[in-house]
Image: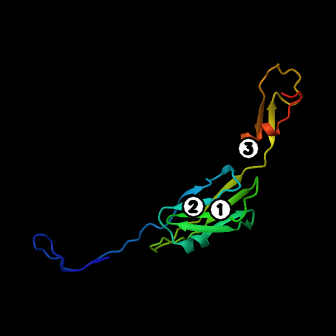
Amino acid sequence: ARIAAGLTDTTGGILAEDYVWSFATQPPKVVWVSPSEDATLVGVETAVQVTFNMPVDTDSAKAAFHLRAGRQDVPGTITVDGATLTFTPTERLAFDTTYSVRVDAGVQSVAGGAGMREDYEWRFTTVPLPRILRTEPYDGQQDAPPYTAFVIYFNAPINPDTVMPNLEMTPPL
């Protein structure tokens, strides 16, 4: 930036020579992600979102984003709206799978300047297929009190509307 000589103050004083200085703005950096780092029980139809501290250049953000299961890239579409990148997988994610996400260094702001300084990486794990962990009364229990409540413990969130139609009690309730 430059202020040319000849600038005057309110008393008539004149800036004798040019004043020149330079500065750089903060580069882009990741400030929020979804799913969150190390999240578990993530739905298999989840989009991945990355929010930066400023609006980013679409092309550099798209080129820097990677979602992988093991060593396999996950296909999908990427949109960038201001400071937010959204990756939508082409197909739903696999059950009970750990995914790694990486945004490479170099993502540019829409104003240009220095790119993101460091890679940003995190992982999340999708929900497993439903499985019953245990029940109360426990399987084979011979001394459960009459009229006792029963509890079913699952390994993942279950749609409650599907429990009773799929439950069979002997003798029937």
**Tag 2's secondary structure?**
strand
Residue 2 location, x and y as percent?
29, 78
Residue under the image location 78 percent in, 34 percent down: 152
Dot placed on the residue nearer the N-terminal end, 1 or 3: 1
Measure the alpha-carbon separation of dots 2 and 1.
10 Å
- As drawn, 161 above or below 94: above
Decide if residue 13 is on the left or right side of residue 3.
left
Considering depth in this image, is 102 or 134 the residue closer to the camera?
Answer: 134
* Residue 85 location (% of width, % of height): 57, 64
The amino acid type found where label 3 is placed reads: Ala
**Left or right position of 4 against 166:** left
Location of the C terminus (image quadrant): top right
Task: Kindly indicate the quadrant of the structure image that contains residue 99.
Answer: bottom right
For marks 2 and 1, the one nearer the N-term is 2
Three-letter code for the amino acid on which mark 1 is drawn: Val
Identify the amino acid type marked 2.
Val
Residue at left 61%, top 68%? 78
Taking depth in this image into account, of 1 and 41 the one nearest to the observer is 41
Of labels 1 and 3, the one closer to you: 3
81 or 109, which lies in front?
81
Confirm or deny contact between disc 2 and disc 1 (CB under 8 A).
Answer: yes
Circles 1 and 3, Cβ within 8 Å, touching? The answer is no
Q: Residue 132, percent across and down?
A: 81, 39
Q: Which residue bears the numbered disc 2?
A: 50
First-in-chain label (3 vs 2): 2
Badge 3 density bin: few <14, some 14–19, many ≥20, Cα 10 Å: some
Circle on res. 156: 3
**Residue highlighted by disc 1:** 101
Nearest the camera: 20 or 43?
43
At x 89%, y 27%, the residue is 171
